[in-house]
């Protein structure tokens, strides 16, 4: 039996903390997410998260920024505005808790530069295939509205939101 007093070292602490935070977010929403709970879920000391996140809000902002990064990657992999619309709706349906955190009022991007940059990167993926910025904003408003209505249970169950995407939005030439 070892009596070593060497501290436990977690090689990938930040990703492990973010994964634990996302799991807690899914299980109980942002209200049940604390740095102490995330540390416990990641199997590290309650002080370990402070090596990467100054506060609970900083952790939530990092998690939302990661979500925007994943959304942006999904949008870049999709073809055209209709394909991006499908990818956006799929992301929101597959990750509803993360999606709500990303777009919720709890975080202000102006207070978190990395969050602001990640959100801008996701929008840039959409804007890159639109004819102009106004078209990109209209497409974003459409899919965001559809995703929100569906997530909140206000979308008619007998109507496929993807069918709405057949509305013609001109693509960038």
Image: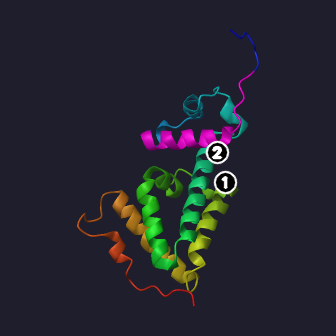
Q: Quadrant of the C terminus?
A: bottom right
Residue at figure coordinates x 60%, y 53% from the top left: 66
User: Which residues are drawn in magenta?
Assistant: 7-27
In x, y percent, where is residue 55?
65, 39
Q: Identify the residue at image location x=69%, y=32%.
A: 10
Tag 2 residue: 58
Secondary structure beneath label 2: helix
Q: In the figure, 70 relative to 170: above or below?
A: above
Question: Which one is nearer the viewer's eye here, 87 or 61?
Answer: 87
Q: Nearer the viewer, residue 35 or 168?
A: 168
In percent of width and height, residue 65 lies at 61, 55
Q: Which residue is at the far left?
A: 158
Which mark, residue 66? none
Q: Secondary structure at mark 1?
A: loop
Q: Which callout, 2 or 1, points at the residue further toward the start of the chain?
A: 2
Kindly tell me whether residue 56 is visible in this rendering.
no
Indicate yes or no whether the magenta region holds residue 1. Answer: no
Residue 85, quarter of picture: bottom left
Identify residue for label 1.
Answer: 112
User: In the figure, 86 relative to 133: above or below?
Assistant: above
Percent coordinates x, y for residue 130 in the rendering: 55, 82
The crowd level at tag 1 (other Cα within 10 Å; few <14, some 14-19, many 20+) is some
What's the residue at 66%, 35% (across, down)?
Answer: 49
**Relative to 23, does residue 90 appear above or below in the rendering?**
below
Is residue 86 rendered to the left or right of residue 126?
Answer: left
- Whole-angstrom CA distance, mark 2 to mark 1, is 8 Å
Image quarter (top left, top right, bottom left or bottom right) of the N terminus: top right
| Frontmost residue, 54 versus 46 | 46
Q: Are marks 2 and 1 in contact (CB under 8 Å)?
A: yes
């Amino acid at each position: 039996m070892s009596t070593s007093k060497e501290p436990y070292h977690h090689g990938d602490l930040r990703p492990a903390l973010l994964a634990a935070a996302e799991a807690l977010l899914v299980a109980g929403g942002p209200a049940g997410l604390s740095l102490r709970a995330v540390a416990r879920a990641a199997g590290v000391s309650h002080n370990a998260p402070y090596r990467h996140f100054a506060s609970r809000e900083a952790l939530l902002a990092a998690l939302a920024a990661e979500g925007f990064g994943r959304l942006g990657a999904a949008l870049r992999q999709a073809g055209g505005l209709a394909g991006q619309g499908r990818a956006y709706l799929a992301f929101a349906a597959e990750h509803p808790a993360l999606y709500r955190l990303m777009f919720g009022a709890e975080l202000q991007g102006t207070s978190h530069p990395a969050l602001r940059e990640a959100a801008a990167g996701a929008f840039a993926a959409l804007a890159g295939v639109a004819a102009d910025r106004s078209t990109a904003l209209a497409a974003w408003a459409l899919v965001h509205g559809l995703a929100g209505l569906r997530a909140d249970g206000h979308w008619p169950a007998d109507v496929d939101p993807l069918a709405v995407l057949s509305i013609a939005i001109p693509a960038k030439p």
